[in-house]
Image: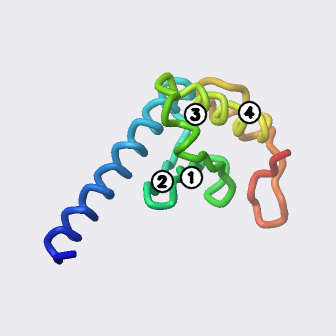
Amino acid sequence: MSKRYKKNMLAEIEAANQKIAKDIAETLNVHYPNHAWAVNADVKQGIVVIYNNRLSGEMGFLLHMADLINDHAMKLVIKSGGEFLERYNIARGEFKERDLFSLKKDFKGDFLHE
C-alpha cells in the first residue's frame, strides 16, 4: 500500500467520522436543544460515543454503528439521548439551567445519575 493511498484512506475515514458525529449531534440538538452534546464517531471501531458535557464529561453512552445503518430517522439516537437525560432526572426536551439545581452531586461535585 503506497503512502499516498494510505493518506487518502485515512482522510476519508476522518471525513466519515466527522460527518457521522455532526449528523448525530444535530439530531440530538433538534430534539434536546441547548444541551452540550459531544459526539465522537470512530468508523474503524464501529462505535459512536456521546456525552452531555453539562451533566458529565465522563459518563456518556455508546452506540454501535451497525445499529444505525438502517436507522435513517435516527430513532435510536433520539431514544438513547432521552434515556440518558432521564438517568439524571432531566426531562426530555430543551435544557433549562434550573434543572441542574435539583440534581444531587457526589463528593467530587459530579452530578449523580441512576
**N-terminal label among 3 and 1:** 1
Q: Residue at x 46, y 52 (%)?
A: 41
Return the residue at label 1.
49
Q: Are marks 4 and 2 in contact (CB under 8 Å)?
A: no
Choose top left, top right, bottom left or bottom right for residue 97. top right
Q: Earlier in the sequence, mark 4 or mark 1?
A: 1
Q: Nearer the viewer, mark 3 or mark 4?
A: 3
Q: Residue furthest left?
A: 4
What amino acid type should be assigned to the residue bearing mark 3? Val
**Within the image, what quadrant is residue 5 found in?**
bottom left
Q: Which residue is mark 4?
A: 90
Q: Tell whether 84 sits left or right of 75.
A: right
Q: Amino acid at mark 2?
A: Asn
Going by the image, does 103 lie left or right of 61? Answer: right
- Earlier residue among tags 4 and 2: 2
Q: Which secondary structure lies at badge 2?
A: strand
Image coordinates of residue 47 in percent, x first then y, are: 54, 53
> What mark, if any, has residue 21 been given in the picture?
none
**Tag 4 secondary structure:** loop
Q: What's under tag 4, amino acid-wise?
A: Ile
- The residue that mark 2 highlights is 40
Give the CA distance from mark 4 to mark 1. 20 Å
Q: Is residue 78 above or below residue 61?
A: above
Query: Alpha carbon of mark 4 to alpha carbon of mark 2: how far?
Result: 23 Å
Say whether disc 1 or disc 2 marks the residue closer to the N-terminus.
Answer: 2
Q: Which residue is mark 3?
A: 77
Distance of mark 1 from mark 2, alpha carbons?
Answer: 5 Å
- Image quarter (top left, top right, bottom left or bottom right) of the N terminus: bottom left
Q: Disc 3 to disc 4, how far (Cα)?
A: 17 Å
Q: Quadrant of residue 77?
A: top right
> Do the residues under discs 1 and 2 have CB atoms within 8 angstroms?
yes
